[in-house]
Amino acid sequence: MALVQNKSATVATLNSDSGVPNSAIYGALKKLEKRGLIELQNSKPMRYKCLSPDVAIFKLKHDFEAECENIQCQLDTIYGTSIEEAHDEGVWVIKGVNNVTNKIIQLIEEASKEILILTSFTPFDRLAEKGDLHKKDYLKIVQLFNKKTAQGVDVKMISSSESEAMKMSNMVPLALIRVNDLKGQLDGLKSFIMLVDNSKTLLSTVSEGDGNLDLNAICADGEDFSNTMSHLLTARWEISKAYEISK
């Protein structure tokens, strides 16, 4: 910050403006130099100049993305080898709003044939109200549903009420929507069950306390578990009535 304020400065100036001891300043400057964020003027005393914020941030982003790509290549190689050796069909626990929504996004992106869902959008509405980050994830999920329907993937949604069905229909117009209102048994549904390509299942529940909402989920890619969920969700789909848009 002291460098940004001064554009260029000596160690003495940086010490005066930042309050950081000289011994610590030299170490910090060396790290900044290594990352290419500052320039040196070979003068007496030595002067240091920072890059403009936009150039510095661009460089940081570029370096970070390059590092991530390198790490991903290495991890993909290791992961691919482990997949060939054994396929784990476990049931996994996922905790936290960000982790659960990221998993939902991943599963939707991987869908190639069908997505079958028993849900209420209410929990996601309320999460979206909690902040811009959750709203961004919520909108991305809706966009992905629309992308998949446009690609020919069958997106089937079983709603808990006519009002929820209307909301779903407005958000994902090409989705196949049915209403399963069993005398109010599903009113205020606080779960999200999704079956992807009849092979991957995610069951998420919403917990609420002290005014805060949180998501937890179990995810399974095992054949036995997914077959069971497929049977239950398909049965629920069959006994539900098709949603008809009011004219």
Image: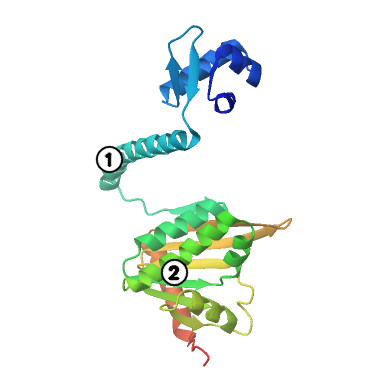
- Left or right placement of residue 210 versus residue 70 in this view: right
For label 1, the residue is: 77
Q: Nearer the viewer, residue 128 or 241?
A: 128
Where residue 14 sits in the image (x, y, percent)? 59, 17
**Image quadrant for the N terminus?**
top right
Where residue 153 sits in the image (x, y, percent)? 34, 72
Mark 1: amino acid: Thr
| Residue for point 60% across, 70% down | 122
- Left or right placement of residue 40 versus residue 183 in this view: left
Dot 2 falls on a residue whose secondary structure is helix
Mark 2: amino acid: Met
Is 189 placed above or below 70 here? below
Where residue 61 sits in the image (x, y, percent)? 42, 38
- Number of numbered callouts drawn: 2
Residue depth check, mark 2 versus mark 1: number of the one nearer the observer: 1
For label 2, the residue is: 229
- Left or right placement of residue 110 versus residue 160 in this view: left
The part of the image, by quadrant, that contains residue 80 is top left
Where residue 112 sits in the image (x, y, percent)? 31, 66
| Residue for point 47% across, 67% down | 142
Residue located farthest toward the top when viewing the structure as drawn: 44
Does the image show residue 161? no
> Dot 2: few (<14), some (14–19), or many (≥20) neighbours within 10 Å?
many
